[in-house]
Amino acid sequence: MNNSLTVRLLEKISRMQHSEQSDKKIWGGRFTEKPSSIAEEISESISYDHQLYREDIAGSRAHARMLAAQNIITPEALQNILNGLKQIESEIEAGQMTFLASLEDIHMHIESRLTQLIGDDGKRLHTGRSRNDQVATDTHLYLKKVIKQQSDLLHSLLQCILDLAEKNRHELWAGYTHTQIAQPVRLGHWLMVWFWGFLRDARLLKLVFEETDISPLGAAAMAGANYPIDREMTAHDLGFSEVYQNSMDAVSDRDYQLSYHFFVTRLFLRTSRLCEDLILYSTAEFGYVKMGDAVTTGSSIMPQKKNPDIAELLRGKSGRVTGNFMALLVNLKSLPMTYNRDLQEDKVYLFDSVEQVNQALLGLNEILKNIQFFPEKVKLNLNRGFAQATDIADYLVKEYKLPFRETHEIAGRLVALAESQQTTLDKLSPVDIKSVVPEGIVLPADLFEVEKSPERKNGTGSVNKEAINKQILSAREKLKSMFT
């Protein structure tokens, strides 16, 4: 549903125009007094679960077709129900339905309007089901749809990262540990770190889909229906792979949402780390990257500023979605079987996290499509950070068979000498070097060139050019196999 329609719906809710029909609760047979205004305010979920109207109508259609097939309702009643649901869907799409807090949720709104349109046949629709299995079915359908959409967004982001890595595969880059210069690597290798991580997230999302692809419909309140219903028929009609094998499990299970929230939390942890790198690397002190105007903002007072606000906001949202995950965990903790109204809150967390993921995947894609890299600044910092030191120590082990602890000390003394002279290792003179290394040892000049360091690294997954080429080729194959 578009944002303008959502705004119109919320405006209608806020007016709370109670009609005579809306004051009559579908569950009110045993009650003699109406709920208080605060009770209705606490109870309502229509302000957010109106988003489920498509899923709710789809579930109602499938349920009605099954009732007719089982001779629980007549073919004429089925046709009336289907016609009425079609009109309701059109009304909601056009923003013509008035949403009221007194009708609580999207399920009651649709059933109430259906009864207005077609009379007693509308009251027959709820035969053999409960709002408990109805809302569970709606959220399963909703999340399945979301997962498919977000899988496509992940695919686009992965493709973007892979293309960027291939384009910059052999450019010099800096590897860090403890936020200190560690060793020279290649830009393509650094970019591929993010590819493999987001690919694991895509794989996790597929597992979440499998957990979600189970139909609760027909479990009714929690014990099943007192009618000869066909749950497999409705599951097939709605595109589910299977049904819950336990009716109590069907209405109380929120594992599929917990799994989705874990996916979201992990995705945002990765997103926040990538954004943190980009934010640091875009500072004047680093100067490794420049983010485009399309994904940066200016300052209201300082004309020179180009702020990485989009990356900062995505980094900040990691706390928000982690909060949604924790909120659902706490909501479920010690909750007795089976359905409890506490579970209504699950949609608040779910809808928000879904929106945050959409923004993150689109935002990262846009950032990476509007980025420039400056390897020359990287080279400058690699030299300033004495990134060749490990290569020197390893060279002495391989060529002179010295113990590594001894060569580590020799390389460290060279670093200390360069620091004392306020210079870099590649600027040390032969006399300076000779004053530190043992008699008879010669260090070749290219050992002090940071550009040569990556080619000395060996093994699958390392930073030499051949290994990076193989890594990118493997990544393309895995990406293709996962999304076909």
Image (cartoon, rainbow, N blue to C red):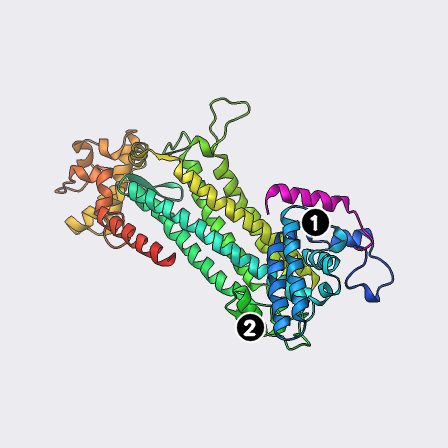
Q: Which residues are magenta?
A: 1-21
Which kind of residue does numbered mark 1 sit on?
Met
The location of residue 250, given as percent across then percent down, is 60, 69
Residue shown at 39% from the left, 54% from the top: 199
Where does residue 153 sit, x and y in percent of width and height? 45, 49
Check the image and report above or below for 319 versus 129.
above
In the image: residue 386, left or right of residue 64: left
Name the residue that disc number 2 marks.
232
The local crowd at label 2, few if under 14, some if 14 to 19, many if 20 or more residues have their Cα within 10 Å, is some
Marks 2, 1: nearer the viewer: 1
Q: Is residue 95 visible?
A: yes
- The one nearer the camera, 237 or 199, is 237
Q: Residue at x 44, y 51 (%)?
A: 152
Helix, strand or loop for disc 1: loop
Residue occupying the far left of the picture:
440
x then y, percent, for residue 27: 77, 64
**Image quarter of the C terminus:** bottom left
Marks 2 and 1 sit apart, C-alpha to C-alpha, by 33 Å
Q: Is residue 199 left or right of residue 298?
A: left
Tell me the residue at 57%/55% (across/down): 325
Q: Secondary structure at mark 2?
A: helix
Instruction: Give yes or no for residue 413 being in the magenta stretch.
Output: no
Specify the amino acid type for callout 2: Glu
Which picture quadrant has residue 190? top left
Q: Dot 1 surroundings within 10 Å: few (below 14), some, or many (20 or more)?
A: some
Query: Which of the labelled discs sits on residue 97, or is there none?
Result: 1
The image quadrant that residue 32 belongs to is bottom right
Secondary structure that dominates the magenta span? helix
Between 266 and 215, the one lying in front of the other is 215
Quadrant hosting residue 76: bottom right
